[in-house]
Image (cartoon, rainbow, N blue to C red):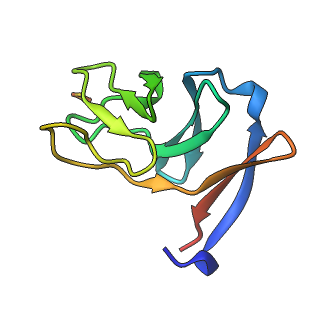
């Protein structure tokens, strides 16, 4: 995605996201889950499992992935791709932490 078409928005404090958990952000009709790892890295994925649209935000974060709470597919937090033998992906969004605030890049288009 072209950086010029994205807008960085402040979606809250890092401390408001539980470690190994997520917080949901609405962007139009889409819900984006912002995940926090045990070592305070953040990742953002559409909150919609590529299997049957399960809420990834309610899954467990581990090893750079989240396990879907419905049928245990494992999704890469960095790419949004299903791991192992499962196939499919969700959109991943650029996200970063700046001075304790979580900034999410969303599509303006
Ligand atoms: S809906 Fe996520 S594994 Fe089935």
Q: On the image, which quarter does residue 43 sit in? A: top right
Q: Nearer the viewer, residue 27 or 12?
A: 12
The reply to whether residue 31 is visible in this rendering is no
The image shows residue 45 at horizontal and vertical percentages of 46, 45
Residue drawn at x 21%, y 48% as measured from the top left: 88
Q: On the image, which quarter does residue 5 sit in? A: bottom right
Q: From the viewer's perspective, is residue 29 above or below residue 71?
A: below
Residue drawn at x 41%, y 22% as measured from the top left: 59
The reply to whether residue 30 is visible in this rendering is yes
The image shows residue 51 at horizontal and vertical percentages of 20, 37
Q: Quadrant of ligand 1?
A: top left
Left or right: residue 108 versus residue 100 is: left
Task: Residue at the far right: name it.
Answer: 99
Left or right: residue 60 versus residue 100 is: left
The image shows residue 73 at horizontal and vertical percentages of 24, 29
The image shows residue 69 at horizontal and vertical percentages of 33, 19
Left or right: residue 14 versus residue 47 is: right
Q: Nearer the viewer, residue 96 or 34?
A: 96
Q: Nearer the viewer, residue 85 or 17?
A: 85
Left or right: residue 78 versus residue 20 is: left
Residue drawn at x 39%, y 52% as measured from the top left: 79
Instruction: Give the total number of marks visible in the rendering.
Output: 0
């Amino acid at each position: 995605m072209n950086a010029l078409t994205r807008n960085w928005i402040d979606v809250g404090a890092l401390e408001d996201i539980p470690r190994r958990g997520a917080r949901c952000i609405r962007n139009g009709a889409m819900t984006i889950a912002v995940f926090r790892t045990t070592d305070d890295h953040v990742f953002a994925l559409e909150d919609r499992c590529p299997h049957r649209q399960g809420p990834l935000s309610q899954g467990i974060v581990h090893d750079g992935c989240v396990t879907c709470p419905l049928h245990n597919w494992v999704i890469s937090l960095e790419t949004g791709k299903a791991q192992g033998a499962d196939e499919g992906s969700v959109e991943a969004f650029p996200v970063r932490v700046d001075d304790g605030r979580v900034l999410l890049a969303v599509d303006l288009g």
